Amino acid sequence: MKVVVLVGGVGGAKLAYGLAQVLPPNDLTVIVNTADDLWLYGLRVCPDLDTIMYTLSGLVDKTNGWGISGDTRNTLNVLSRYGEDTWFGLGDQDMATHILRTRMLQAGYTLTEVTERLTKSLGISQRVLPMTDVPVATIVDTKEHGELEFQEYFVRHRWQPTVTGLRFAGIEQAVMNEAVESALTQAEIMLIGPSNPWLSIDPILAVPGMREAIQARSVPRVAVSPIVGGTAIKGPAAKLMAELGYEVSAEAVALYYGNLINGFVYDQMDAGLNIPISQTANFETIMKTDEDKVLLAQNVLDWIQKWV
């Protein structure tokens, strides 16, 4: 049962972790948003890829859901002493990931090749793929500051500015690499993790040919809602939906994905909603523990197998 899951950061990483515990390693491919990536101190930082890698390898800081557990920030502390505005947190161990990634990219390796090297070194057997090897950047148009690069909006301003629009710089030049195309072609189940549809999933779907490749497959294509009880479990999804004119509900998420999906999973708290998708299920989707992640993954797969 070949499963492909599209994810962003923390929420998607939790589902990916659960899937990794219940599927044979060769049956799971995780396609990750890279439009959050940035250059910082001369290093290429890929926050969502790193969150997926650290989660699948068991290194992640479970309190934050990102970064490496027990990491220190001595390097940032010295940079701050030199007068740098260290608004973006990088741990000392985490920085090793960025150093190696940058060195390999500068040597001519693709981001896909770099990610394969990093994941194998961390003992990850599942395939983790960037959505594209071409740099793409989410640009957030805000009422207060005009256009901001994503991490400026998300980290420096703590996603408090009012969003009026989004665009993905460089998306026209982006291409699906061979590994992504192959994974989509072989997929027997396609999942969209409980990541922010606008900030995490849309950049993946915007890669030329990606949406069409997914929609063309007559297999289960199931999204898991990041909205529970009219709010987001983590991050700016609910705030962003309201600012962009959407009702903040799981139903609105399902409507947004539209005919890209033919199945939708939402939380038991929202069991009374009328979800306009042919196949729906509601489970406990709030993943506080590793056991919760595994249970949700197993429930979703078991449910899909009943209606395939």
Image (cartoon, rainbow, N blue to C red):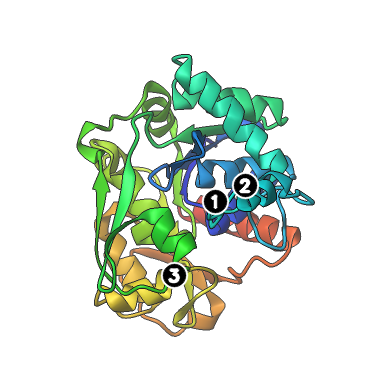
> Quick check: can you spot residue 33?
yes
Of marks 1 and 3, the one in the foreground: 1
The reply to whether dot 1 and dot 3 touch (C-beta < 8 Å) is no
Q: Nearer the viewer, residue 134 or 70?
A: 70
Identify the residue position indicated by label 1 in the image. Answer: 84
> Quick check: can you spot residue 23?
no
Q: CA distance from mark 2 to mark 3?
A: 29 Å
Of marks 2 and 3, the one in the foreground: 2
Q: Residue at image x 62%, y 55%?
A: 14
Tag 3 secondary structure: loop
**Mark 2: amino acid:** Leu
Question: Which x, y percent locates residue 261?
Answer: 33, 55
Mark earlier in primary sequence (1, 3): 1
Which residue sits furthest left?
172
53 left or right, relative to 172: right
Identify the residue position indicated by label 3 in the image. Answer: 236
Question: Which x, y percent locates residue 106?
Answer: 46, 19
Identify the residue position indicated by label 2 in the image. Answer: 79
Q: CA distance from mark 1 to mark 2?
A: 6 Å
Q: Residue at image x 58%, y 34%?
A: 98
What crowding class fits label 3: few (fewer than 14 Cα within 10 Å), some (14-19), or many (20 or more)? Answer: some
38 left or right, relative to 295: left
**Mark 3: amino acid:** Pro
Question: Which x, y percent locates residue 5?
Answer: 48, 45
**Mark 1: amino acid:** Glu
